[in-house]
């Protein structure tokens, strides 16, 4: 399933936003809240479980993922911003984490580290007060 198709499953709720905007703030509902029901979406069961596990702190007890945006004075712009955030969040949750393969340092890096330690040690020992 394409992530762009999620646009049909997303619901928006608008409300009045605080902040700058003069009288416009008191009249127009520019704050946008994106609501996405994870359980009833068309994502695969595996994708749903991954999203629920990784985004559990953003999902309500009803299984609704909620994001808010009130950055601009335009409701349409806020809708676009919050949907872009939503897509990025879902993509990040669904990208698999690469397993770390442990490696050994090569000879040159070991030699370089030991040389640096030796130089540093010599620098420190040269600072000592010498009784002569």
Image: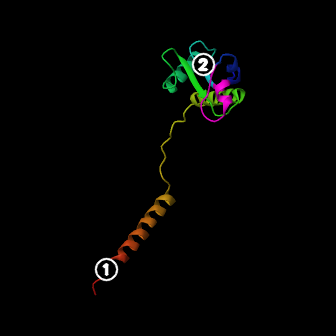
Query: Which quadrant of the structure image shows residue 32?
Result: top right
Q: Earlier in the sequence, mark 2 or mark 1?
A: 2
Q: CA distance from mark 2 to mark 1?
A: 70 Å
Q: Residues within 10 Å of mark 1 (few under 14, many from 20)?
A: few
Circle number at residue 129: 1
**Disc 1, SS:** loop
Q: Position of residue 121 (x, y in %)?
A: 38, 69
Name the residue: 58% across, 26% down.
67
Q: Position of residue 27 (x, y in %)?
A: 67, 24
Q: Position of residue 113 (x, y in %)?
A: 46, 61
Q: Is residue 126 above or below residue 92?
A: below
Name the residue: 27% across, 84% down.
131
Which sits in the foreground, 61 or 72?
A: 72
Which sits in the foreground, 5 or 97?
A: 5
| Residue 22 is inside the magenta segment | yes
Residue 28 in sight from this viewpoint: no
Q: Split into 4 quadrants, where in the image is the C terminus?
A: bottom left
Residue 124 in sight from this viewpoint: yes
Label 2 sits on residue: 36
Circle number at residue 53: none
| Side of 65 where 126 appears, left or right | left
Q: Position of residue 73 (x, y in %)?
A: 68, 32
Question: Magenta segment, which residues?
Answer: 13-31
Mark 2 vs mark 1, foreground winner is 2
């Amino acid at each position: 399933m394409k992530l762009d198709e999620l646009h049909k499953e997303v619901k928006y709720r608008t409300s009045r936003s605080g902040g700058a905007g003069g009288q416009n703030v008191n009249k127009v509902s520019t704050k946008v809240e994106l609501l996405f029901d994870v359980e009833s979406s068309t994502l695969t069961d595996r994708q749903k479980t991954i999203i629920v596990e990784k985004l559990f702190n953003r999902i309500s007890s009803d299984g609704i993922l909620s994001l808010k945006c009130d950055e601009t004075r335009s409701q349409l712009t806020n809708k676009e911003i919050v949907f872009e955030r939503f897509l990025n969040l879902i993509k990040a949750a669904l990208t698999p984490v690469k397993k770390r393969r442990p490696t050994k340092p090569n000879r040159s890096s070991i030699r370089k580290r030991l040389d640096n330690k030796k130089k540093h040690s010599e620098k420190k020992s040269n600072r000592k007060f010498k009784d002569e």
